[in-house]
Amino acid sequence: MENAPEFGLNRFDWTSTEAFVADIQRAEEVGFGYALIPWNPLSRRDPYMELAVAAGRTSRIKLGLLLDNPVLHHPAVSASSIATLDELSGGRAILTYGIGDTAVRWLGLRPARMAELEEATVLARRLLAGEAVDVGAVRPAELLHARPVPIWIAAGGPKTIEMAGRVADGVFLRVGRHPENLRTAIERVHAGARAAGRDPSEIGIGLIFHTVMSDDPTEIRATARSMAAGYYEYSPALFEIPGLPWDGPPVEELKQQVYPDFHHAPDLVESGNLVSFLDEETADSFALFGSAEDIAGQIREAVAIAGRVDIVVPHPVPMPVPGAPVARALPPTLAGADYKTWFAAEVMPRL
C-alpha cells in the first residue's frame, strides 16, 4: 500500500506502571508508531506520569493522550504536561483533545461544549508555541518551557470536525467506515481549514476504528451492532448522512439497560443483541472485523476514500485482558499472541 499510515495502539496493560511500560516497549518492538492513552482519573493512573516513565525506556514510538479534555484539565495544565513529556521523550509527544465523555460523566460533570473545546485548543496551541496570551490576568500567560507539540482533536460530529479543521494540528475521525461518513468528514476538515485560511493538506488525519477481536460470526455481528449503536448514541448525524435506519426504541430508552454506553458495555454481545433491529449494512459501517485479510481490506478501502491518512488506530473491542491471547484462531507461529502482536504480524504487513 503506497503511503501507508502509521498505526497507533490505545489499549495496554493497566495493571501496574511497570506492566504498562513493558507493554509500550512491546508495541514499539512489533512496529506500532504511536502509543495513545485514554484517560479516566477513576480507572487509570496518571497518564502523563506513566508516559514519562515510558519515554525513558523507548526510543521511536510517539507518546500521547487520546484523549485529554478541558473539563478536568485547564489548557495550561495540559500544555505544561505535554511539553514536559515532549522534552523527556526527545520530541515524541502528541496531545489529543476531546469533550471528555466517560471520564467526565463518571464524575457527574458535563462534557465540554464545542466552543469550549475550540477555545481550549487555541489556548493550548498558543502556549505551546511560546506566545504570551492575554487570559485576563494581571499580565499575559506564557509557558516558559514551551515546545512545538502537535494538538489533535478527536471528533465525530460534523460541526466539531469542521471546528477541528479550523484550529487543530490534526483530527482523529471517529465516524466509522461508511464511505459517505468518511467523505463528509474529510470535506468538513478541509472546509474548516479553508475558512481559517489554512492549507487543508497540512491538517493531520487519523482514523479510529473499533476492531472486533473475535472471529466468531455471531460475536462479530452482535459486537458490531453495539458499536453502531454507540455512534448513534453520541452522534445521530452519522446515521443521517448515509441514510442508515434506526428502526427500534429510542436510544435513550435502551441506554437504561446499558452501562456506561454501547461502546464500553461489559458484555458487548449482550448490548449488541439489544439493537438486533439494526440491519447488516448499519452493523458493517462502524467497525473492522473478520480475518486479517478482511480487516486489512477494510482499512485499505477507508484510506482510499479518505485520501491521505497519517494514523490509523485499530481500537480493540472488547477490552483485551492483559496477557491473554487474542480471542481468535491463531497460526502455530503466533500461539498465545495478544492483540497487538497478532495485529502487527497479521494485519499490518498486508498494508
Image (tube, rainbow, N blue to C red):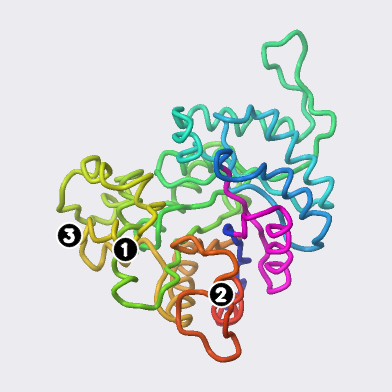
Pick out the residue farthest to the front.
Answer: 15
Q: What numbered label is drawn on residue 269?
A: 1
Q: Is residue 235 left or right of residue 56?
A: left
- Residue 208 % position (x, y): 50, 58
Q: What numbered label is drawn on residue 300?
A: none
Find disc 2 in the rendering and name its residue: 343
Q: Is residue 277 left or right of residue 256?
A: left
Q: Quadrant of the N terminus?
A: bottom right
Which comes sooner in the sequence, label 2 or label 3? Answer: 3
Q: Is residue 9 magenta?
A: no
Specify start and end residues of the magenta stretch as a single range.
12-39
Which secondary structure lies at badge 1? helix
Which comes sooner in the sequence, label 3 or label 1? Answer: 1
Q: Is residue 17 magenta?
A: yes
Q: Is residue 43 left or right of residue 301?
A: right
Pick out the residue farthest to the bottom.
Answer: 332
- Residue sitting at 73 percent across and 63 percent down? 22
Find disc 3 in the rendering and name its residue: 277
Q: Depth-wise, is mark 3 or mark 1 nearer the camera?
A: 1
Q: CA distance from mark 3 to mark 1?
A: 14 Å
Which comes sooner in the sequence, label 1 or label 2? Answer: 1
- Residue sitting at 71 percent across and 31 percent down? 126
Q: CA distance from mark 2 to mark 3?
A: 31 Å
Which secondary structure lies at badge 3? loop
- Residue sitting at 40 percent across and 63 percent down? 177
- Residue 25 % position (x, y): 74, 65
Q: Looking at the picture, which amino acid does disc 2 mark? A: Phe
Which secondary structure lies at badge 2? helix
